[in-house]
Image (cartoon, coloured by chain):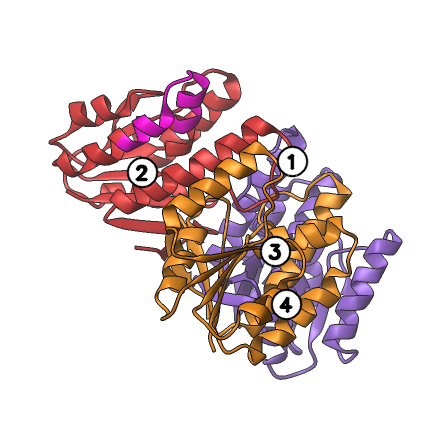
Chain colours: A orange, B purple, C red
Amino acid sequence: MAVILITGGARSGKSKRAEMRTRAFPGQPVYVATAEALDSDMEARIAKHRARRGTDWIEREVPLDLVPALIATDGGGATLVDCLTLWLSNLMHAERDWEREVGELAAALPRLKSPVVFVTNEVGLGIVPDNALARSYRDAAGIMNQIIAEAADEVEFVVAGLPMKLK
Amino acid sequence: MAVILITGGARSGKSKRAEMRTRAFPGQPVYVATAEALDSDMEARIAKHRARRGTDWIEREVPLDLVPALIATDGGGATLVDCLTLWLSNLMHAERDWEREVGELAAALPRLKSPVVFVTNEVGLGIVPDNALARSYRDAAGIMNQIIAEAADEVEFVVAGLPMKLK
Amino acid sequence: MAVILITGGARSGKSKRAEMRTRAFPGQPVYVATAEALDSDMEARIAKHRARRGTDWIEREVPLDLVPALIATDGGGATLVDCLTLWLSNLMHAERDWEREVGELAAALPRLKSPVVFVTNEVGLGIVPDNALARSYRDAAGIMNQIIAEAADEVEFVVAGLPMKLK
């Protein structure tokens, strides 16, 4: 079992890096999208990601119930979860207890047999947002990233497509 | 004398890291909070930080006059200043000459006998803010961080709870 | 030929670092400013940068046509381009095809004889902006930075005036 966390800013090359790391493990890779194709912008972006990574992935759309999804696909190739920050946003939008669910995810990781590669975003390096909801989300994302980084075996911070090893 | 600067984004684990670095020095640690408990949100956050770091710290609330406070507690254990960006914001709000005061802080550091660990924030890695005040603050924070990093013996950049050594 | 990309946040010390790297090459350095002195704020900032770097630079103001400008000054000392994110903003404002122009810049680099040092900004590490134009710009800047980083021989990420080597 290996857990890898790939973090970075918007359009920093995180997903591409995470796809490469996932493919490096043996077996058919699994792609867990936390995004739902709710509008045409999102559909276009999802199609672009799919075109880049190729069609040989098992694909799952998992907006909320990440732990059961990881358990369901466990035992085969590595799973790429793209991305945790969108999952967090889905949890908050659905008024679920995100702190509990992030804790449950961290606790579930050591029990998985297949490698998991997570993509997440750094969102706390700008000015404090005016909007209270954005502030809560920013704080939650920072806390989640610390918890998953602590549970991970490897953590990379990607800037301009280039990874820095944090752990 | 050792001066350590710990920088990073919101909820990146900077304070926790800085507490660990401060405790590693001999003597009773000193906690200099630049925040004032002005509302219940802030009170709750201060209480949470205090619960984490333990009750064996000497505590000071220093929103503005940092150099005299560092001189006053000098000679004992290490001092943790959490955080410089809030101090800067307090100076700007009080219409003090922040550039002069940051320069005075940098100049005072080599004369201290006890180690000092500073926490600061990176706030310049997002989109340029619309608001002129936020832009000025962002610029000032970047300039202050460069000046204190230059004066420091060690600088760490914390992402997802994990430090990268910059100096 | 050497291509160096210096990235970082606002007021992180990127320009100062890039000036130092440019000066380390033999020959008279060339300064390509992508900013135009459109208002007094910008004029003041340009004057400040000029005072720091000294008067022994060949100076060019190039808001849009970067590739011809690099070819025109090629063959002498190193060229500093400060900065790519402003160039991108100028291209978008002029409704030019920025993706094509960034691709042309990357393709032109291996043909240059003189070293080039680029300054760029990381703008994608804050909260997703509300404003659609800011989101497009943020995405474009991330994509451009990946493309130029890929074409560069060296990439540095500057935080608090201190460089981290990415490539």
Q: CA distance from mark 2 to mark 3?
A: 41 Å
The 10 Å Cα crowd at callout 4, few under 14, some 14 to 19, many 20 or more, is some
Q: CA distance from mark 2 to mark 4?
A: 44 Å
**Which one is in front in this view, the residue at disc 2 or the one at disc 4?**
4
Q: Is residue B106 magenta?
A: no
The alpha-carbon separation of the residues under discs 4 and 1 comes to: 40 Å
Count of picture labels: 4
Q: Are marks 1 and 3 in contact (CB under 8 Å)?
A: no
Q: Can you identify the residue that label 4 sits on?
A: A67
The circle on residue A62 is: 3
Three-letter code, disc 4: Val
Q: Percent position (x, y) of residue C21?
A: 27, 45
Highlighted range, magenta = C88-103
Are labels 2 and 3 on one chain? no
Residue labelled with disc 1 = B134
Spatial CA distance of label 1 from label 3 is: 37 Å
The reply to whether callout 4 and callout 1 are in contact (CB within 8 Å) is no
> Residue C91 is drawn in which quadrant?
top left
The label nearer to you, 1 versus 3, is: 3
Residues indicated by labels 1 and 3 sit on the same polypeptide chain: no
Label 2 is placed on what type of residue? Answer: Phe
Q: Residue furthest right?
A: B40
